[in-house]
């Protein structure tokens, strides 16, 4: 329901009543074909909010070409008829008579079991941007406006130009922390995404024009996420300049802009720029207060949703959950994770009503495509905006297919993946009676499922489809050779069509699921995941190799937000132990696993006092929550380290501070951040150490306000609301001093006599300190991931953390279906994020358990029993144990595919001496046709 | 890349995301307020988990801020 | 580059899970490489029957690339 306002929420968890107001679109969505004629005829101009006001649209319009629903609408505030009762030109321009000014707003009441609040974020007020001449000079723009400039569907079709005089900029500056970390606009928090998008936009701008000079002015570069530091290094190697400085102001200066900044050393400088981009933060949604009142939940000091560390997605109203940026500023993968987690929690709340309201989608009956039938191929060549068409001559490629054997229809489309293009595809299949579809566009790895769905909708078997990749493999990689790229596209399309002539429909197959889950690891991630699955009604095994539950949380005493960890942990372990659906096995490890999604069989080995016992369990899914451990580098920043009472890690300091007795806090403490991290020993940032240091610093100050605490850091990464604690620590006299890798702190001596010499940029001199405690903020390393990686055939990244299936959109799933990851095994992260991730992994894992079956890809091997000679070569070669020799009714040895675990690799088919094995979608016939077409000109 | 797919997936489940003409579902339903990437993902997961979802979006189209982005960090994948 | 003198026709068999994916990433990262390769996607290079290679040469390929 779009164009809808949320008005009220009554009732209790499980049975809420919500009222909504559905505002009229003034266009009948069933009649609108999204042709766009009305927008052409509409006489009034309207600033286009989708393009951040940088382009002009009309009151009757659609936000963007791929918008869902693909129905135009009329902005009542701008429409001449709705405002002044005149015009109505659109009514006569619309061929399908879809415009209906008689539509009225209507109110609806919904009966619902649970609510998820995901209203996103708001904008930093323009007044905050004024000191950078925003609004006074057109070449000062926000990062969102710059994003639109970079985009092919943006105001200049992806060309970066100054808004003032359309010249191409030579020098661009980014200013970080605009509207973030700034009490001046009551946004004391860090928005946690701006450093990343600034790097991204800078890199894309540099790709557009390698000559452009780009500088990013920052306070701390907070690229703490998985793989984020590496991206910053790439940006540096592309020539993007990073300057640690505060920007005082930006003023018009002739045709340019003058940017004045001051560095840590206190020097003031200014530089000219053509464009200044303000990296604006994420504000709370504008209607946050209103939403809070309507739905009856509390907000925090910054008008984001109020939540607790150990229940990050619960609002103060039971049955109402929160997800995404409204919970706190965050990036896309974290929002996606929170959404899955919130979905899992809501599902757990109303588990007894599961499936009651579902409506099953029905597909038209599949039309029979027999061998004898004439091959009728439709070819669709995609422009992908300008991604393909700016290099490849799309029209020439399309025309090239004219007259090819079997091709009865060919066409171009602007975005073949868009919703309207799917409708066109369906219509063309029907109109031309197509029984094979070839789409020349991007990668089948990402888009094949979408098109296959459309084929099913059109009554075709989804395997009657071939995709030709003329974007990732052609236009993008041969950008400077348009003629050669066009030729390559033609060749690839010819080969695709050749294969398409031989493709056959393949049957859909499903396999039943054992509705139990196995969770590896009994830390906070594993326990949370187990509870979330059990709440949905499924039996769960928790396997922990140590003798106690709780993992690393057992070593933590308090959180930055002030929770006492042991109380929370006790509650959690009690809940798990008392849950009848959860079976806990301590001192136990996974020793063997076989099977596939829905049907795993695992051998668990439990260490006994004398002997080990083995148990075999059957389960449908696996969640990996095996955690990580503290890294203890022996060399820190080039200095050999011997750990002792006085040279210790943050975790050890925390235990000391939370102990009993007096004088717990050392009189003088020196903390060294990134000890062994970010290229020192480990290559990555562990995300938690900065907050951990601040947490302990505040604790010391609370215990002994006169203690001297100095923190040496590279970038303080107290992102999100943790920034408040960082500011508080500074206010309480904790001294933060940055160091660089070119000028690292030097340690001397050992034990109590350890002294540290470092450069203080404010004093502009070397300082030596002999602290009572030298605290190393060490990182987190993966533990045991390589072994599990081998057992389950799931990949790990170069830092030995599990690699998710898609970084943005499938953050808790792994490449092997039915296997999910959460917690430190995925990457270092704070406990709040671990809990969310565990809930998300549990929600995802519950999907096959709920459905009760899994669908198998039809592209698997199939044995022709007639030709098979039962030699057994295939059985011995199959890496997945998915083909076996059985005796047929005549007692003859014959091979047989185990459908559910076949991965479709084709080793059996290529080795079969009598060509008895064919691979669905990759038959000898099809591949040979492609090779022959390769040779043909 | 992903979002177009997600949006298409979403609209390919029309029965689950629109109001039924025959009236309201009383149990086994969830309301998601906000049609950005977070709301869309929650709605998709809930339908997969076996619940009927009302996705409530105040503007004319779902997609939220992510639909305005050109590329995504750190892989520079297309965000649509 | 010797492209003017020698412009080979290369036929590649790419594994869906690794090399095809890598070719996709090359595209996403806009790495530029010579346009001489024509590819066939397979689910695994295990699918590669030696006969395919011979047929490729017979059809005029100057080289066969197997990425898996």
Image (cartoon, coloured by chain):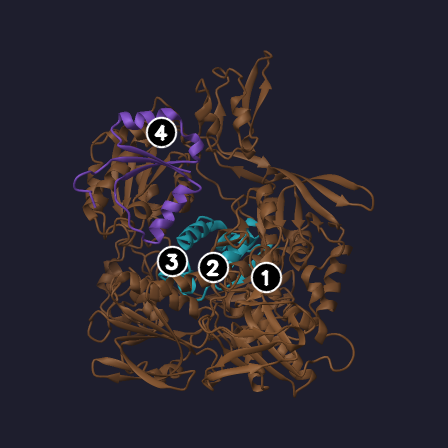
Chain colours: A brown, B cyan, C purple
Horizontal and vertical percent for residue A600? Answer: 63, 39
Whether callout 1 and callout 2 share a subunit is answered yes
| Cα separation between marks 3 and 2 | 13 Å
| Cα separation between marks 1 and 3 | 27 Å
From this viewpoint, which residue is outermost toward the top? A890
The kind of secondary structure element at disc 1 is strand
What residue is drawn where x is 61% and y is 74%? Answer: A749
The chain letter under disc 3 is: B
Q: Which residue is mark 4?
A: A927
Q: Which residue is mark 3?
A: B76
Horizontal and vertical percent for residue A902? Answer: 52, 33
Which quadrant is home to the C terminus of chain A?
top left
Dot 1 surroundings within 10 Å: few (below 14), some, or many (20 or more)? many
Dot 3 surroundings within 10 Å: few (below 14), some, or many (20 or more)? some
Q: Is residue A308 left or right of residue A814?
A: right
The chain letter under disc 1 is: A
Q: Which residue is mark 2?
A: A227
């Amino acid at each position: 329901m779009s164009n809808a306002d949320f008005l009220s929420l009554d009732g209790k968890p499980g049975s809420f009543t919500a009222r909504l107001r559905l505002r009229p679109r003034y266009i009948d969505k069933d009649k609108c074909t999204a042709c766009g004629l009305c927008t052409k005829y509409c006489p009034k101009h309207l600033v286009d909010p989708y393009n951040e006001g940088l382009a002009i649209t009309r009151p009757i319009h659609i936000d963007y070409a791929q918008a869902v629903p693909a129905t135009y609408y009329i902005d009542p505030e701008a429409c001449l008829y709705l405002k002044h009762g005149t015009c109505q030109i659109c009514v006569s321009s619309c061929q399908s008579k879809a415009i209906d000014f008689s539509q009225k707003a209507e109110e609806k009441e919904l009966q619902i079991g649970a609510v998820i609040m995901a209203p996103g974020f708001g904008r930093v007020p323009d007044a905050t941007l004024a000191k950078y001449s925003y609004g006074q000079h057109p070449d000062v723009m926000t990062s969102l406006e710059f994003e639109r400039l970079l985009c092919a569907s943006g105001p200049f079709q992806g060309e970066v130009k100054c808004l003032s005089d359309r010249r191409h900029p030579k020098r661009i500056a980014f200013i970080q922390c605009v509207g973030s970390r700034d009490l001046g606009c009551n946004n004391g928090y860090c928005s946690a995404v701006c450093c990343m998008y600034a790097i991204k936009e800078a890199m894309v701008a540099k790709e557009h024009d390698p000559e452009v000079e780009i500088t990013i002015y920052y306070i701390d570069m907070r690229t703490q996420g998985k793989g984020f530091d590496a991206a910053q290094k790439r940006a540096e190697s592309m020539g993007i300049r990073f300057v640690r400085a505060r920007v005082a102001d930006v003023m018009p200066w002739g045709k340019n802009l003058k940017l004045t900044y001051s560095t840590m050393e206190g020097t003031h400088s200014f530089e000219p720029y053509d464009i200044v981009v303000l990296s604006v933060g994420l504000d709370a949604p504008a209607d946050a207060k209103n939403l809070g009142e309507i739905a009856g939940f509390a907000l925090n000091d910054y008008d984001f949703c109020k939540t607790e560390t150990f229940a990050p997605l619960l609002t103060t109203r039971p049955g109402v959950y929160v997800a995404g940026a409204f919970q706190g500023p965050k990036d896309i993968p974290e929002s996606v994770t929170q959404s899955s987690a919130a979905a899992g929690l809501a599902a757990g709340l109303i588990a007894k009503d599961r499936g009651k309201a579902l409506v099953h989608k029905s597909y038209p009956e599949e039309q029979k495509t027999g061998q004898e039938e004439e091959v009728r191929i439709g070819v669709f060549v995609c422009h992908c905006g300008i991604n393909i068409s700016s290099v490849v001559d799309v029209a020439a490629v399309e025309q090239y297919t004219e007259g090819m054997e079997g091709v009865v229809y060919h066409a171009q489309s602007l975005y073949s993946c868009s919703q309207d293009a799917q409708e066109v595809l369906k219509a063309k299949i029907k109109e031309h009676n197509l029984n094979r579809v070839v789409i020349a566009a991007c990668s089948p790895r990402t888009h094949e499922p979408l098109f296959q769905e459309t084929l099913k909708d059109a009554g075709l078997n989804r395997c009657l489809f071939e995709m030709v990749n003329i974007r990732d493999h052609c236009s993008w990689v041969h950008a400077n050779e348009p003629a050669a790229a066009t030729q390559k596209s033609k060749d690839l399309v010819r080969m695709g069509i050749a294969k398409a002539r031989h493709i056959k429909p393949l049957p859909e197959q499903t396999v039943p699921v054992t509705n139990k889950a196995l969770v590896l690891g009994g830390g906070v991630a594993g326990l949370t995941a187990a509870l979330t699955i059990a709440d949905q009604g499924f039996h769960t095994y928790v396997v922990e190799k140590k003798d106690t539950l709780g993992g690393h949380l057992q070593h933590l005493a308090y959180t930055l937000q002030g929770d006492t960890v042991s109380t929370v942990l006790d509650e959690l372990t009690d809940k798990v132990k008392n849950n009848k659906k959860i079976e806990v096995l301590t001192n136990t490890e996974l020793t063997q696993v076989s099977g596939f999604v829905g049907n795993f069989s695992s051998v668990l080995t439990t260490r006994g006092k004398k002997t080990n016992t083995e148990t075999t369990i059957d389960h449908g899914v696996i969640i990996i929550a095996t955690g990580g451990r503290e890294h203890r580098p022996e060399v820190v920043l080039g200095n050999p380290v011997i750990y002792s009472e006085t040279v210790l890690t943050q975790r050890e300091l925390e235990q000391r501070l939370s102990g009993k007795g007096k004088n717990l806090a050392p009189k003088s403490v020196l903390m060294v951040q990134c000890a062994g991290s970010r290229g020192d020993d480990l290559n990555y940032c562990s995300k938690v150490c900065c907050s951990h240091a601040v947490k302990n610093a505040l604790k010391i100050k609370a215990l002994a306000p006169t203690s001297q605490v100095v923190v040496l850091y590279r970038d303080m990464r107290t992102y999100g609301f943790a920034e408040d604690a960082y500011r508080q620590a500074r206010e309480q006299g904790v001294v933060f001093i940055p160091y660089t890798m070119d000028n690292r702190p030097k340690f001397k001596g050992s034990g109590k006599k350890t002294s540290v010499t470092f450069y203080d940029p404010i004093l502009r001199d070397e300082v030596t300190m002999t602290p009572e405690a030298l605290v190393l903020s060490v990182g987190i390393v993966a533990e045991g991931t390589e072994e599990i990686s081998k057992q389950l055939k799931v990949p790990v990244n170069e830092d030995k953390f599990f690699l998710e299936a898609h970084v943005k959109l499938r953050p808790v799933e792994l490449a092997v279906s039915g296997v999910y990851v959460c917690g430190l095994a995925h990457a270092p992260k704070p406990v709040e994020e671990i809990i969310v991730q565990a809930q998300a992994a549990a929600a995802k894992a519950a999907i096959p358990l709920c459905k009760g079956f899994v669908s198998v890809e039809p592209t698997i091997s199939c044995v022709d029993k007639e030709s098979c000679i039962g030699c057994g070569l295939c059985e011995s070669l199959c890496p997945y144990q998915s083909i076996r020799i059985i005796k047929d009714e005549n007692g003859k040895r014959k091979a047989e595919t185990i459908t559910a675990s076949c991965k479709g690799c084709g080793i059996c088919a290529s080795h079969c001496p009598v060509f008895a094995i064919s691979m669905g979608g990759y038959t000898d016939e099809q591949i040979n046709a492609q090779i022959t077409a390769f040779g043909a000109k | 890349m992903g979002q177009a797919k997600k949006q298409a997936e979403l609209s390919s489940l029309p029965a689950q995301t629109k109001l039924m003409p025959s009236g309201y579902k009383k149990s086994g339903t969830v309301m998601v307020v906000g049609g950005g990437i977070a709301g869309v993902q929650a709605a998709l997961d809930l339908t997969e988990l076996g619940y009927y979802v009302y996705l409530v979006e105040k503007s004319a189209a779902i997609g939220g801020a992510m639909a305005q982005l050109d590329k995504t960090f750190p892989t520079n994948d297309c965000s649509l | 580059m010797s492209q003017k003198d020698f412009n080979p026709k290369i036929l590649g068999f790419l594994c869906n899970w690794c090399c095809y994916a890598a070719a996709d990433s090359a595209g996403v990262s806009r790495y530029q490489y010579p346009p001489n390769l024509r590819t066939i996607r397979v689910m695994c290079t295990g699918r590669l029957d030696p006969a395919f290679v011979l047929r490729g040469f017979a059809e005029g390929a100057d080289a066969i690339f197997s990425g898996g």
